[in-house]
């Protein structure tokens, strides 16, 4: 047996044996146990701005949460539309999270949109137009895979709307516009499957015939396998 055939045999043993299986099992387990990604989109629309409309004041009349009509005047008013989607691989029975505003922004009212009557979104302490707040806490029940909830947050500010941040005590991470990551993850997974499958076939053909062409073919497919393993590692880092 030539040196090339010995090298091919050694690499084939590693790919087909316990080492390859252990590596793939570790990476798959890590992928499944990763922090669950919560996809979100956030857009802020300015409704009124005192600097653009000199002498104009926006008057918002709403029914406050004490069931009495309250007329409140705001010189600046914006609405932030927040959409949350569970992009993880686990269903969450009860999901708690919070919204925090920075700067001089203050929340005056909210409107919640649930997918249907079997899904509920609750605000633990509703804002009061007479006593604005910069923090809100919500509970979603349930928050299963691909469930989507929408929040319209009405806020006022003196200069510009401050930054809105999301937080949760759950083992999750908030990811903005995760669709690109999902596409990359799917592509890498396909590369891994094709690469490992073709490598096994090529190595078998090379070792069975023993000719130079099959040997080079096998070596080339081993390289594909190496690239596939690298793809798995990249996939693990992206989705963790």
Image (cartoon, rainbow, N blue to C red):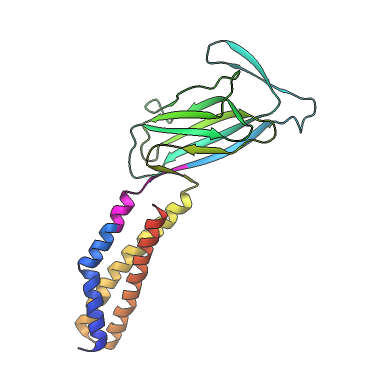
Query: x%, y% of residue 75?
Result: 71, 26
- Quarter-wise, where is residue 121 in the image? top left
- Quadrant that contains the N terminus: bottom left
Viewer-nearest residue: 78 or 133: 133
Who's the residue at 24% across and 84% down the image?
5
Query: x%, y% of residue 240?
Result: 39, 52
Whether 33 is among the magenta residues is: yes
Residue that lies at the very extreme toward the front in this rendered image: 103
Query: x%, y% of residue 53?
Result: 77, 30
Who's the residue at 60% across and 11% down the image?
69
First to last magenta residue range = 27-39
- Quarter-wise, where is residue 199 in the image? bottom left
- Quarter-wise, where is residue 232 in the image? bottom left
Residue that lies at the very extreme toward the top in this rendered image: 68
Left or right, 93 with reference to 3: right
Residue 229, above or below 37 = below
Who's the residue at 70% across and 34% down the image?
159
Residue 160, above or below 19 = above
Who's the residue at 52% across and 41% down the image?
41
């Amino acid at each position: 047996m030539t040196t090339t055939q010995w090298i091919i045999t050694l690499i084939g043993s590693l790919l087909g044996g316990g080492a390859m299986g252990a590596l793939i099992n570790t990476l798959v387990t890590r992928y499944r146990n990763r922090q669950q990604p919560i996809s979100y989109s956030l857009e802020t629309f300015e409704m009124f701005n005192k600097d653009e409309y000199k002498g104009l004041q926006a008057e918002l009349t709403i029914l406050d949460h004490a069931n009495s009509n309250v007329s409140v005047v705001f010189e600046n008013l914006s609405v932030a539309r927040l959409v949350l989607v569970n992009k993880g691989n686990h269903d969450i029975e009860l999901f708690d999270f919070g919204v925090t505003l920075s700067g001089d922004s203050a929340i005056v009212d909210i409107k919640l949109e649930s997918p249907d009557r079997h899904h509920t979104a609750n605000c633990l302490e509703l804002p009061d137009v007479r006593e604005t707040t910069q923090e809100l806490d919500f509970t979603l029940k349930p928050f299963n895979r691909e469930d989507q909830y929408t929040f319209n947050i009405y806020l006022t500010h003196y200069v510009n709307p401050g930054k809105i941040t999301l937080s949760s005590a759950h083992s999750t991470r908030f990811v903005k516009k995760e669709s690109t990551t999902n596409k990359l993850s799917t592509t890498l997974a396909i590369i891994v499957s094709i690469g490992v499958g073709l490598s096994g076939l090529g190595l078998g053909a090379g070792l069975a015939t023993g000719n130079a062409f099959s040997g080079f073919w096998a070596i080339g497919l081993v390289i594909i396998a190496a690239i596939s393993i690298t793809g798995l590692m990249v996939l693990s880092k992206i989705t963790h």
